[in-house]
Each structure stands twice: as structure tokens, then as C-alpha cells.
């Protein structure tokens, strides 16, 4: 199956990196390959090291890279493990933290509340029995812990009501699918909340996905390790999609600035244009921050 992902803030991200020929770029979140493809098309001698935790990402996107295979190497790995890979110093690093359209539409792992799928929410294509899934969380975690992650990671104001609804529902039968969970959330929140523009399940699904994949802890680790392999004068572009991610990025950048190790390329985040949002509504919450390493 080919990638259907539309890359967000494509030109702004690449322009922010200030690339030149013969650079080596680490695409730490390959996804649908949009950034990598655009870079290889624009710069005829740049090489890409592409990482993705989802092993199927390259299979879905590789048709875009016919004739370019010698300039891109794909590694099936999470960016938190950059230091354990055979990756030397690079000239630029990209982190696109958004869930790809492929994962939402085609993964079958329960990222979207619009499809009835197993409630896994793991970024791994083939999770092992030891890997945490959303099924584990909703069926075994205590009510207080559920409420805390739904509020903390989803900023959901009805977190306690939803957590209580989950605990009551699982007493009757196991919560196994996305629609099982959607029905519980629907019955747990006020009627007026169900009719708002933002779908009533959005924040709970976000919270569970973040918890399953330890996204905030992984991001902090990935930023540190990505910065470590960046050459002096190299730049890092990070696209975030919700306030929790953006906060981690902003704090990390400020720390490097305070340590005298980096400078900010854009003091305020770059956001998509109205035209981009119109063409790709999923881009509306994205923010781009660019950092340059100076020591």
C-alpha cells in the first residue's frame, strides 16, 4: 500500500535547515517520506538517514524514491535509540512529531476513533506480548491513574467522568476496540460536549496514544541525542502538533540557549498558512521551531 500522507510545513521545515550540497540529514521521523523526498529533489548530493519505528513506513513510501535509493538509507528504529545506531555526525535533523495519515487510515492499530479497530495505539507494526497497548491501559489501570493520564496527556476536562465510565464498562466486558471506547466516552460526557466541533473522543485517544508510546519521554530523549550528533552550525527542525509536545521542544531549546550551545532561528513558532490549513486540515495545530547548534 502506497503512502497517502501529506507532509505539514514542508517548505518551511526544509528552508529552516539551511541546507547545502553534500550535507547529511537525519530524518528522525520518516513517516510518508515527504521531507526526505523534497530534500533529495532539491539537493542533488545530499544524503538522508531515515528512521521510523514503524517497519512498514519504507515499504509504503519507497516508490517515491526510485532512482534515489543510493542517497537514502532507512533504519527501522525509534529516534530515542539514535545513539545505539551506526550514525555519525549529521548536518541537520528533522523531527515531525505528527501521527501520519498512513497510521490513522491504514495501520489497523486503533489510532483513529473513526474506524472500528483493535485498541492497540502502538507505533510498532508488530507489537510483542510484552509491549504496552491501549487495551492493557483501559482494562487494567486504576480509575485514578486513568483519570490522571486522560487529563495530563489529553487535557480533557471530563477525564474523571470518562475514567469512571471506563472502569464501570470493563466490569461487564473487556474493552477491545476503538468503538467500544468511543461509546464509553460518549456516554460519560455531557450532551452539549458531544456536539462541539472537536470530536468528544479526540483528547482521550491522544492521551492513550501518548501513554502507550511514552511519547513525551521519548521526545525528550530523542531531542538530546539528536542534538548530540548534530555538527556545529547544524540545525534541527521540530514540528509539534499539541501543546504538550511543543512545551517539551520549547523548554529543550531554551535550555540549549541558556547553556550557550545553540541559538534560536525563530523565536516564535512558524505555523501553517490559511491555504495549507484549507488543503490539509490536519495541519492546523502544527508548530515549527528551528534551532542551530553553535558549540
Image (spheres, rainbow, N blue to C red):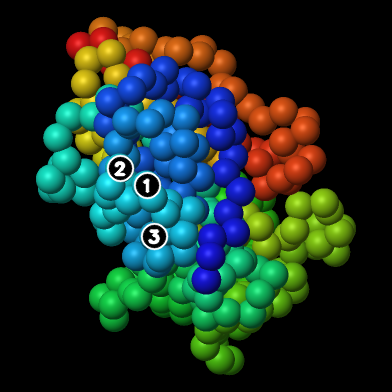
Q: Is residue 51 above or below residue 14?
A: below
User: Residue at horizontal 62%, vertical 55%?
Assistant: 203
Residue nearest the viewer, comparing 162 with 95: 95
Which residue in the protein does label 2 denote? Answer: 71
Q: Position of residue 228 (x, y in %)?
A: 20, 28
Residue projecting furthest to the bottom: 172
Which residue in the protein does label 3 denote? Answer: 58
Q: Nearer the viewer, mark 3 or mark 1?
A: 1
Which residue in the protein does label 1 denote? Answer: 68
User: Residue at horizontal 30%, vertical 36%?
Assistant: 47
Q: Is residue 23 above or below residue 83?
A: above
Say left or right for 20 vs 238: left
Q: What secondary structure is marked by label 2? A: helix
Q: What secondary structure is marked by label 3? A: helix
User: Residue at horizontal 26%, vertical 10%?
Assistant: 294
What is the spatial separation of the Cα atoms under label 3 and label 1, in whole angstroms?
13 Å
Residue nearest the viewer, comparing 182 with 283: 283
Asked whether the beta carbons under mark 2 and mark 3 sit within 8 Å of each other, the answer is no
Q: Position of residue 113 (x, y in %)?
A: 65, 68
Q: Nearer the viewer, mark 2 or mark 3?
A: 2
Tell me the crowding category of disc 1: few under 14, some 14 to 19, or many 20 or more residues within 10 angstroms, Cα based: some
Quadrant for residue 24, please give it. top left
What is the spatial separation of the Cα atoms under label 2 and label 3, in whole angstroms?
14 Å
Tell which circle, 2 or 3, labels the residue nearer the N-terminal end: 3
Amino acid at each position: 500500500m502506497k503512502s497517502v500522507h501529506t507532509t505539514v510545513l514542508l517548505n518551511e521545515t526544509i528552508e529552516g535547515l539551511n541546507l547545502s550540497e553534500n550535507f547529511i540529514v537525519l530524518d528522525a521521523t520518516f513517516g510518508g517520506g515527504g521531507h526526505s523526498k523534497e530534500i533529495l529533489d532539491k539537493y542533488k548530493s545530499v544524503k538522508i538517514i531515515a528512521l521510523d519505528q514503524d517497519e512498514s513506513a519504507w515499504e509504503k513510501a519507497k516508490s517515491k524514491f526510485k532512482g534515489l535509493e543510493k542517497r537514502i538509507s532507512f533504519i527501522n528504529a525509534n529516534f530515542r535509540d539514535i545513539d545505539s545506531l551506526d550514525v555519525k555526525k549529521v548536518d541537520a535533523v528533522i523531527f515531525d512529531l505528527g501521527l501520519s495519515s498512513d497510521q490513522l487510515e491504514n495501520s489497523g492499530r486503533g489510532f483513529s476513533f473513526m474506524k472500528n479497530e483493535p485498541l492497540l495505539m502502538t507505533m510498532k507494526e508488530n507489537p510483542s506480548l510484552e509491549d504496552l497497548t491501549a487495551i492493557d491501559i483501559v482494562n487494567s489501570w486504576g480509575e485514578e491513574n486513568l483519570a490522571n493520564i486522560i487529563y495530563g496527556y489529553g487535557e480533557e476536562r471530563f477525564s474523571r467522568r470518562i475514567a469512571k465510565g471506563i472502569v464501570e464498562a470493563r466490569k461487564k466486558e473487556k474493552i477491545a476496540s476503538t468503538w467500544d471506547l468511543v461509546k464509553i466516552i460518549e456516554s460519560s460526557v455531557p450532551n452539549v460536549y458531544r456536539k462541539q466541533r472537536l470530536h468528544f473522543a479526540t483528547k482521550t485517544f491522544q492521551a492513550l496514544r501518548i501513554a502507550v508510546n511514552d511519547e513525551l519521554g521519548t521526545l525528550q530523549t530523542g531531542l538530546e541525542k539528536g542534538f548530540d550528533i548534530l555538527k556545529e552550525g547544524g540545525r534541527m527542525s521540530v514540528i509539534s502538533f499539541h501543546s504538550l509536545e511543543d512545551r517539551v521542544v520549547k523548554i529543550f531549546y531554551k535550555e540549549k540557549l541558556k547553556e550557550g550551545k545553540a541559538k534560536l532561528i525563530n523565536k516564535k513558532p512558524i505555523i501553517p498558512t490559511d491555504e495549507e490549513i484549507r488543503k490539509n486540515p490536519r495541519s492546523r495545530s502544527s508548530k515549527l521551531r528551528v534551532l542551530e547548534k553553535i558549540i
